[in-house]
Each structure stands twice: as structure tokens, then as C-alpha cells.
Image (tube, helix red, strand yellow):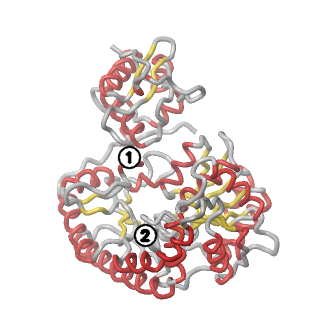
């Protein structure tokens, strides 16, 4: 029985227009004939999709009869699925409003839980983000104290970012080969914030967006929440297929394309210069906005750091290229400082967009960022050398304990994209947690459910001894029997 008290969040009716179609949902669910009892199998899959954010909260689910037809099963089975979802708190119903999705009390969406550190003594390999040396932070805080005092009498609002930080970022782009004025810089609360602002200004629900597959999960989630239609282009161990990129831009004409050409997350690939030029030309012909994520560009381990993507454009050809970056991967994720470079007029529009959400970033964080950026010549070489040692230790441990796994050593970035040889990544991730290692299946980086189940992204951002211990624990977990999903139980799609 559903509690009808209007003040309870669980009884919030679905938002207008947020409806999951029967065929859309059926494409995300496994074949009900693949396991018994089918209704429990389907309910478990549905709850997982809700936790993962692939089905929005408070969205209306299809009518029982429609979903039964789409799945090729009985209405009785779907009725039992919805009953079980309601009993477990993943759905609520109200006469006249249908059935809509929800979360049980105490459960957290995985997009949030993945950012929270593991409990107890688990080794965290789910987050590819380095820490900041304590003394570096202490010294920087001491250094900015007089500057912070100067800002104290002011209101403290800087919707574009601190002028000195904007100037330093513009000079940084210019030094790397892309002449830039401070007016072309917007300081944001991380690269994810920059991407969200761009999507909110340039895209509308239903617009097509070209993305790489695999890609950065939080970026994919931002596109889903904006109700955009992702059109994927593959990134393999060999890199990008430029002909597929060109044909996608020509035939689909996406409104926007989100790319990570510098030590791509998660594959680690580096896009060659000639492919950058061809991508810029193809996007120019289609009128597509290019959003280039440079978050990892400075983490060049075996090659020179690449110049900005937009520097390869013809003179005057950067009008629809937006470059986003962050200090999260080079310095510390706790320093919520990112930026974007775009035409000055667009920066003004984006600043207006951000005022509606946060009015401006923290002055303390921006002063810290400015200090750390001016010291990058001293700090970054030591960080890169540390990453080289940790990458070598991870590769050595994998070769020793899991010789059946394969990977390519990336020329930069923070992780290995490991091929397990069979689709057991999700099962291994669950078993590894029991052995004290938290890691994500490659499926988390896919544009569609069910892909990259044979892959793991393994960061080398933790100390050498920790990495070796983590690999030993994963090898122990792998030694246990892992269930490989049968073809009948894997997700199926409707084109």
C-alpha cells in the first residue's frame, strides 16, 4: 500500500515529460527468458539501471502491458516486477499518475558513491586522481594569506573568475601555442562544471552530441541528464578512426562533439596532429561545436606535452572550439578549479549561465590555484616522475600476477586500459571488493550498457606498494570462479 502523505519525497509525482518508453526500457533490460524467476531477474536489472542513473529518478515507467509486449513476456511477469520494485523502494505508484522510479531510503546513486572514498581498508582504484603533497598545500596557503586579506573587504563575487587567474590561464594557453586573451577565459568549479555550462547554453533536449566510446563517465552522465542523444565514435587501443569521425560529423551533423584527445580517459591514447586537423575541418563544415577536454594534457610521460587542440585550426578557425581544463588530475581534486577557453562573446554568455547556479567560485581556491600554477615548473616534473614509477610498478605486478591480461602502455595520463580476455569485469569488481579493492568495470565508461565488460581501467595514482598489493588481491579474486554472463542474459538493443 502506497503512503499518500504529500510531504514525503517518495510520493513525489513524476515530472511532466519524463517518461521512459517501453522500447527504450526493453533495450536496456536483459532477455527475461535468460533466468528464472524472470520477474526477479528483471527487477534486479531495473534497480541497477536506476542506481547507475541510466534511468532518471521520478521518471514514469511504461504501462505494464506495453512493457510486456516490448519484452516478449507476460503482463503477469511485469506486474510482479513492478510490485517488487515498489516493495524495495525503487518505484512508487499513484492512481492516475502511473508508476515512477525512486531510490530506497539510505541508498545513494552510484555517481555519488563512486566519488566517496572506500570504507574500512579497501584500496581505491575507482578514482584516477592523485593527492597533493601536504607541505605543498601548507606552503601555498601561507603564501596566499596576505592576498586573501586584501580581498576580504570586497564582496568576493567574480563570475568570470579572479582577473589575475584569468590572465595566468590566458598566458598559459599562449605559451603552449594558442594566443589567448583573458576575456576568452572563464574560471569554473572544475572541468565538469565547465562542460555542464556549455551543454546548458548550446544544447536543447533531443540534440545530437558526438562522443567517444569509451569516454569519461561523468561527462556521459551530464549528457544523459540534459536529455541529449549521444552518437558514439570508437576509440580502440590503436586510437581514433578519423574516417568514422568525419562521416559522423557529415551525416549526423551533431550540435556538439565532446572529445578527449590528450591521453584519452580511459584508453590513454594520444590523437595525432593530422587527425586533429581533419577533425577541426570536418567540424567546421558541419557547424558542430567542439568541446575539447584537456584535463590530462599536462600528464605527458613518454612524449612532449601536446599543444592545444585549437592551435591546429586555420587562422580564425577556432570560433566553435571550446577548450576545458582542470587542476584535478595534475594537482588535486579537492581544489575545485577548472576553466574553459572560448570566444569572448560566448564566455560572457556562459558567465551569465553560471550566475544562475553559483554566482562565482571561491576566492580562496582561485588564489591557491594561481599560486600552484605559477609553481608548475617546479611541481609538475616531480609529479610526472612519480607517475612513471607507479605506472612501471603496476605493469610489472600485472605481468607477474595476471599474465593472461593484456594492455598497451599509454604515453601519458593516469591509468591502464586492461583487456581481461573475457567479459568478467563486473563480476571481478564485485569479488575484488570482498578482497579489499574497489575498482570499476569497463562498462562504466561505455556509451551504452553491456559494452567493455572485458575491460578494467586501473589507475596508477596510488603508491607503488599499494598498487602491488591491489594486483595481488585482484589475482586472488580472479582465482575464484567468476560467472560469465550468457548471451541470453546480456543486454540487447533496438536500433
Residue 456 relative to residue 322: left or right: left
- Farthest-out residue, front: 153
The percent coordinates of residue 7 (x first, y second) are 42, 22
Specify the farthest residue to the right.
316
Name the residue that disc number 1 marks: 110
Residue 18 falls in image quadrant: top right
Q: Which residue is mark 2?
A: 332
Q: Residue at x 21, y 70 (%)?
A: 469
Mark 2 residue crowding within 10 angstroms, few (<14) / some (14–19) / many (20+): some
- Label at residue 414: none
Q: SS class of the residue under badge 2?
A: loop
Q: Residue at x 41, y 37 (%)?
A: 50
Q: Nearer the viewer, residue 238 or 462?
A: 462
Give the mark nearest the N terminus, 1 or 2: 1
Label 1 sits on a secondary structure element that is helix
Q: Would you say 469 lies left or right of 183 here?
A: left
Q: Is residue 240 something that shows in the picture? A: no
Q: x and y percent of residue 494 in the render?
A: 54, 36
In this rendering, would 389 be left or right of 431?
right
Q: Which residue is at a point 66% across and 40% down the rendered structure image?
A: 206
Q: Position of residue 433 (x, y in %)?
A: 23, 54
Name the foreground residue: 123 vs 488.
123
User: Which of the 4 image quadrants contains residue 261?
Assistant: bottom right
Residue 161's x, y, as percent? 62, 65
Category of crowding for the residue at label 1, using alpha-carbon neighbours closer than 10 angstroms: few (below 14), some (14–19), many (at least 20): some
Alpha-carbon distance for marks 1 and 2?
Answer: 22 Å
Quadrant that contains the C terminus: top right
Would you place residue 86 above or below residue 258 in this image?
above
Farthest residue toward the top?
95
93 is higher (above) or lower (below) than 446:
above
Q: Residue at x 81, y 75 (%)?
A: 315
Amino acid at each position: 500500500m502506497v503512503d499518500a502523505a504529500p510531504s514525503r519525497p517518495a510520493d513525489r509525482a513524476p515530472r511532466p515529460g519524463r517518461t521512459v518508453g517501453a522500447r527504450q526500457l526493453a533495450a536496456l533490460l536483459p532477455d527475461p527468458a535468460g533466468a528464472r524467476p524472470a520477474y526477479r531477474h528483471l527487477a534486479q536489472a531495473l534497480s541497477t539501471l536506476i542506481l547507475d542513473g541510466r534511468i532518471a529518478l521520478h521518471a514514469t515507467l511504461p504501462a505494464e502491458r506495453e512493457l510486456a509486449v516490448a519484452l516478449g513476456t507476460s503482463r503477469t511477469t511485469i506486474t510482479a516486477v513492478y510490485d517488487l520494485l515498489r516493495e524495495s523502494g525503487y518505484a512508487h505508484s499513484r492512481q492516475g499518475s502511473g508508476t515512477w522510479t525512486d531510490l530506497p531510503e539510505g541508498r545513494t546513486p552510484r555517481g555519488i558513491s563512486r566519488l566517496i572514498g572506500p570504507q574500512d581498508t579497501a584500496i581505491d582504484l575507482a578514482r584516477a586522481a592523485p593527492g597533493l603533497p601536504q607541505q605543498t598545500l601548507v606552503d601555498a596557503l601561507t603564501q596566499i594569506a596576505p592576498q586573501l586579506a586584501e580581498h576580504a573587504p570586497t564582496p568576493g563575487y567574480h563570475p568570470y573568475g579572479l582577473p589575475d587567474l584569468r590572465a595566468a590561464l590566458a598566458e598559459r594557453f599562449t605559451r603552449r601555442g594558442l594566443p589567448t586573451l583573458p576575456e576568452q577565459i572563464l574560471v569554473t568549479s572544475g572541468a565538469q562544471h565547465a562542460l555542464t555550462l556549455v551543454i546548458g547554453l548550446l544544447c536543447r533536449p533531443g540534440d545530437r552530441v558526438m562522443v567517444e566510446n569509451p569516454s569519461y563517465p561523468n561527462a556521459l552522465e551530464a549528457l544523459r541528464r540534459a536529455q541529449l542523444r549521444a552518437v558514439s565514435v570508437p576509440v580502440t587501443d590503436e586510437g581514433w578512426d578519423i574516417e568514422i569521425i568525419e562521416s559522423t560529423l557529415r551525416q549526423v551533423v551533431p550540435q556538439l562533439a565532446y572529445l578527449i584527445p590528450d591521453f584519452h580517459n580511459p584508453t590513454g591514447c594520444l590523437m595525432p596532429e593530422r587527425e586533429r586537423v581533419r577533425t577541426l575541418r570536418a567540424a567546421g563544415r558541419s557547424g558542430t561545436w567542439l568541446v575539447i577536454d584537456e584535463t590530462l594534457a599536462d600528464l605527458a610521460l613518454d612524449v612532449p606535452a601536446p599543444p592545444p587542440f585549437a592551435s591546429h585550426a586555420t587562422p580564425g578557425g577556432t570560433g566553435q572550439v571550446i577548450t576545458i581544463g582542470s587542476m584535478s588530475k595534475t594537482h588535486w581534486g579537492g581544489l575545485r578549479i577548472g576553466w574553459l577557453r572560448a570566444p569572448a562573446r560566448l564566455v560572457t554568455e556562459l558567465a551569465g549561465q553560471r550566475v544562475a547556479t553559483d554566482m562565482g567560485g571561491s576566492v580562496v581556491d582561485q588564489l591557491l590555484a594561481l599560486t600552484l600554477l605559477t609553481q608548475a615548473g617546479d611541481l609538475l616534473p616531480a609529479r610526472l616522475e612519480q607517475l612513471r614509477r607507479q605506472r612501471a610498478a603496476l605493469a610489472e605486478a600485472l605481468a607477474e600476477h595476471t599474465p593472461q591480461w593484456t594492455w598497451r602502455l599509454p604515453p601519458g595520463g593516469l591509468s591502464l586500459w586492461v583487456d581481461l580476455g573475457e567479459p568478467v569485469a563486473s563480476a571481478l569488481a564485485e569479488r575484488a571488493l570482498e578482497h579489499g579493492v574497489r575498482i570499476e568495470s569497463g562498462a562504466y565508461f561505455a556509451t551504452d550498457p553491456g559494452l567493455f565488460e572485458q575491460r578494467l581501467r586501473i589507475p596508477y595514482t596510488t603508491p607503488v606498494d599499494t598498487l602491488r598489493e591491489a594486483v595481488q588481491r585482484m589475482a586472488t579474486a580472479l582465482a575464484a570462479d567468476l560467472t560469465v554472463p550468457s548471451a541470453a542474459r546480456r543486454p540487447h538493443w533496438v536500433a
